[in-house]
Image (tube, helix red, strand yellow):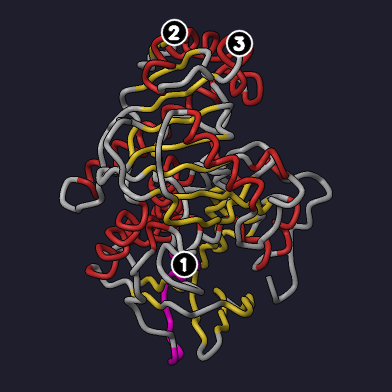
Amino acid sequence: MKPYWLVGKKSSFPVLKHNLHADVAVIGAGITGASVCYWLSNKCSVVLLEKEAVASQASGRNAGFILTGTSDYYSRAIERYGHEKARAIWEATQLNHVLLEKYVFNDDDCDHVRSGSYLVATSDKEMQDLYESVNLLKKDGFSYKLLSEGEMNAILSSKNSSGAAYNAKDGEVNPVRLVEALVGKAKDSGTRIFEKTGVKRITRQKGGFRIMTDHATVNSDFVVLATNAYTPMLHRYFKDKIMPVRGQMLATSPIKKRFKGVFYANYGHEYWRQTHDGRMLVGGFRELDLAREKGYRLGTTKKIQKSLEKLLAQMSLRFRVEYRWSGVMGFTRDHLPLVGPVLDEGNLLVSAGYSGHGLGFGFLAGRMISEIIIDGKTSHELFSPSRYYDKTTPLRHNSDI
């Protein structure tokens, strides 16, 4: 089945059939590629190349959550990154949301609302982690509050929660409309956009790159790999840096409105929301079949889909499933995106590896990439790919990247 967000969506842009030149070639028309094009608008000539259709991959196959932070709870993020860096990451995702409101949501119908998020504990141990995280978040100036087991189970009509943390500033969006809005703004500012235009080969040449597609060639001064999980297919350096992971979802027919906000449970392994027209969207449970959920294969499995249905039933919902789908996410080892120059190749940049939180990082990451290209910034330390470099990293490739 098609993802709920993509039902009825048709291609809007032509196939590239004639050779052309651009200052910047952006590969991948998801949230991050669209954001790069938006921020580069009116500053240089840009071409956007998409193998399938705008928002057809992970950007059109997710639940539409705009969350603060990463897939880790704050206490664990501090252990992983250090306190100062963890706080900076949380602040960056808050800024990402503010920028979207300022530049996109104010004049585009993306079904955006700051409906709030619930981090739902499914065990006493998880609730203890949330208790520690919320205390640390409050000390660092973030607005979270704790909900008791009774309060959360009353919201869920369930007995499976041990409590939750609530953040009123998080929200939801129609992810396809968001990407389309960004692409539309970029097009109006001169970006040339091509769908059904897969990149077959990228070759470095004097002063830039030659990008070969099925029917034509693009010559550009800069290349931005905005291809998330598919980045290793374009540049071999990322084969052990970005891992493809499948996520499965389903959507029900409209039912009586019961939930407001987005729900992120069991350390993010399960998540759901109810759309404005009453549909329940639910995803997750890949931890039940980790081996099969790795790789690029789309499709759904009975094991995980039955678990998604069971989760809805546990909340005393009567429903009929109308859509089932999956998408491939790109995960990095530390669950942070890679945003900046690739190795020492200053005009080859990457914006990928969002580890399931592309809507929380992507718009800001696009601005970071534009600042590197336009303003000459060397990198943004918080998400710099250089954190993975070591003495064994080759600093040059041959003519093919």
Q: Is residue 243 magenta?
A: no
Q: Is residue 349 visible?
A: yes
In the rendered image, residue 343, in percent from the top left (x then y), is placed at: 67, 55
Q: Amino acid at mark 3?
A: Asp
Q: Quadrant of residue 199?
A: bottom right
All told, the count of numbered labels is 3
Q: Is residue 22 magenta?
A: yes
Of labels 3 and 2, earlier in sequence is 3
Residue behind mark 1: 26
- Please state which of residues 76 and 18 is positioned toward the viewer in this rendering: 76
Residue 314 relative to residue 203: left or right:
left
Of labels 2 and 1, earlier in sequence is 1
In the rendered image, residue 386, in percent from the top left (x then y), is placed at: 65, 45
Residue behind mark 2: 148
In the rendered image, residue 366, in percent from the top left (x then y), is placed at: 41, 52
- Please state which of residues 192 and 174 is positioned toward the viewer in this rendering: 174
Assign a secondary structure to mark 3: helix
Q: Amino acid at mark 2?
A: Ser
Q: Main secondary structure of the magenta part?
A: strand
Residue located 43% across and 48% down the image: 362
For the C terminus, the image quarter is bottom right
Residue located 70% across and 76% down the image: 399
What numbered label is drawn on residue 124? 3
Residue interval drawn in magenta: 17-29
- Counting other residues with Cα less than 10 Å from the Cα at mark 2, is it few (<14), some (14-19), or many (20 or more)? some
Assign a secondary structure to mark 1: strand
